[in-house]
């Protein structure tokens, strides 16, 4: 049911405000916290050692740690902007929340891709996007993510196959453009 605007003008209609279900939010928060604890307690120790990670961090210089900290802050600051680019009506924080939540669920739980997709759709529609706008935003973000993953893997593959890796001299081509262009653009003999 629509309500008239606060100034009493019956010609303008404002939609009702969304209500937060506190009970549901607390339950979801507890489930999320339980998943995080499970991941750090059971999953990560199977992949690597916390002691080795701490030893590696302790052996780093302050400059190296600072570079890592700055890179993490910049990464987190721009990570969600892809949704802002795909759907202009989202705020910065909304785009960050959708991207972070979807990534976490997709990579942290079994069958997370399907759950993450549903989560993205639910979050976007909760921000008052139409179903078609939410679907279009998810599609645009997914296509972009697929393209960038493909491009970075292709670039890494090209770099690993470039001749002369490890024998660079001052003034050489540090990114491999010249050697790549010679090998891929030369005419067959």
Image (tube, rainbow, N blue to C red):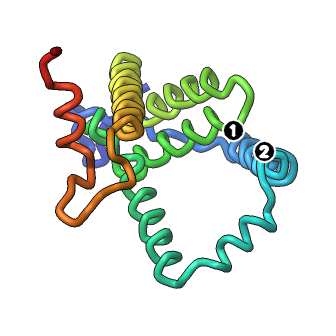
The residue where tag 2 is placed is: 35
User: Is residue 129 visible in this depiction of the protein?
Assistant: no
Question: Compared with residue 181, is residue 39 higher up or lower down, i.e. above or below?
Answer: below
Residue 50 in the image: x percent, y percent? 79, 63
Label 2 neighbourhood size at 10 Å, few (<14), some (14-19), many (20+)?
Answer: some
Q: Nearer the viewer, residue 6 or 134?
A: 134
On residue 79, the disc is none
Image quarter for residue 43? Answer: top right
Label 1 neighbourhood size at 10 Å, few (<14), some (14-19), many (20+)?
Answer: some
Q: Residue furthest front?
A: 189
Q: Residue furthest left?
A: 187
Question: Compared with residue 95, is residue 186 higher up or lower down, i.e. above or below?
Answer: above
Specify whether 107 is left or right of 172: right
Q: Nearer the viewer, mark 1 or mark 2?
A: 1
User: Is residue 131 visible in this depiction of the protein?
Assistant: yes
Q: Nearer the viewer, residue 78 or 26?
A: 78
Q: Which quadrant holds the C terminus?
A: top left
Q: Nearer the viewer, residue 142 or 128?
A: 142
Specify whether 58 is left or right of 182: right
Residue 164 in the image: x percent, y percent? 33, 46
Residue 98 in the image: x percent, y percent? 48, 40
Image quarter for residue 143? Answer: top left
Work out whether mark 1 precedes mark 2 in sequence or the reverse, and give the earlier one: 2
The residue where tag 1 is placed is: 108
Residue at 24% across, 36% down: 180
């Amino acid at each position: 049911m629509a309500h008239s605007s606060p100034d009493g003008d019956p010609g303008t209609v404002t939609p009702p405000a969304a209500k937060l279900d506190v009970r549901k939010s607390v339950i979801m928060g507890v489930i999320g916290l339980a998943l995080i604890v499970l991941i750090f307690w059971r999953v990560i120790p199977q992949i690597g050692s916390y002691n080795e990670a701490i030893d590696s961090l302790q052996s780093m210089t302050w400059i190296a740690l600072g570079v890592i900290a700055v890179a993490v802050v910049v990464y987190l600051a721009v990570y969600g902007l892809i949704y802002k680019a795909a759907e202009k009506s989202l705020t910065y924080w909304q785009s960050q929340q959708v991207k972070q939540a979807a990534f976490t669920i997709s990579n942290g739980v079994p069958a997370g891709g399907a759950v993450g997709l549903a989560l993205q759709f639910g979050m976007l529609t909760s921000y008052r996007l139409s179903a078609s706008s939410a679907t279009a935003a998810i599609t645009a973000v997914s296509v972009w993510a697929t393209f960038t993953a493909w491009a970075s893997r292709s670039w890494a593959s090209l770099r690993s196959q470039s001749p002369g890796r490890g024998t660079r001299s001052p003034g050489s081509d540090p990114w491999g453009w010249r050697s790549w262009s010679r090998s891929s653009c030369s005419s067959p003999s």
